[in-house]
Amino acid sequence: GGITTINSTTLFGSNPLTELLDWALEGIESAYTDVKFYTAPGSDAHIEEFPAMFERGVNAFKFLLAYRGAGAQMFGMAEGGIDTAYMYKGFSKVAELGTPAFAMIHAEDPAIFEYLTPGVMQQKTNNFLDAFHKARPNICEPIDLCKAAYIANEVGCPLYQVHISAKETVDQLQYFK
């Protein structure tokens, strides 16, 4: 009773995104569910691939704002992660594609939690969730949302924040709506 949909972010890394899409689509015609792919761009070359991806049915482009260093490199991004210039460039390209293309963000300012993490680790707690929250205070999320929302509004790009964990983010979303 109903339709099952699989929504996958398998399209990230340092390889060309269209190459990853070819791999992901192998055998898809025999799937028993609806399948949708979205991509997580990490380089200027990836942004240039947006039109080809869009023509093949990929309409969502997820910007992973929370990663720098080794974490960013794991997703095929430069060590510095995604900065505001990259968002501007990427969101502009998404806006050029038109409907139904949109940008998505994983909003969590990495500079704050990178600064707080060493101090939290010195506290030696067994409560992982408490330590995680102390290292990532609620302001990390709305800070990145605000940067992304202002840029998206400026260039005319629809924007979706993929998850919300802070009341402050809800307040900012109301403001931007």
Image (tube, helix red, strand yellow):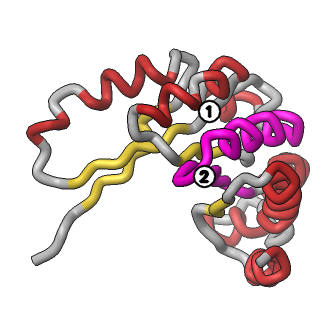
Indicate left or right for 151 with 97 as reference: right
Residue name at image x 37 percent, y 52 percent: 7
Name the N-terminal-most of marks 2 and 1: 1
Circle 1 crowding by C-alpha within 10 Å: few under 14, some 14–19, many from 20: many
**Residue 109 in view here:** no
Question: Can residue 103 be found in the magenta stretch?
Answer: yes
- Helix, strand or loop at mark 1: loop
Between circles 2 and 1, the one closer to the viewer is 2
| Horizontal arrangement in the rendering, residue 88 relative to residue 61 (left or right) | right
Q: The C terminus is located in which quarter?
A: bottom right
Residue 45 image position (x, y, % from top left):
66, 18
The correct choice, above or below, for 169 with respect to 63 in the image is below
Which kind of residue does numbered mark 1 sit on? Pro
Q: Is residue 149 above or below residue 95?
A: below
Q: Front-most of 11 and 79?
A: 11
- Magenta region: 83-107
**Residue 19 in view:** yes
Which amino acid, mark 2? Phe
Identify the image quadrant of the N terminus: bottom left
Q: CA distance from mark 2 to mark 1?
A: 13 Å
Element assignment for label 2: strand
> Badge 2 is on which residue?
102
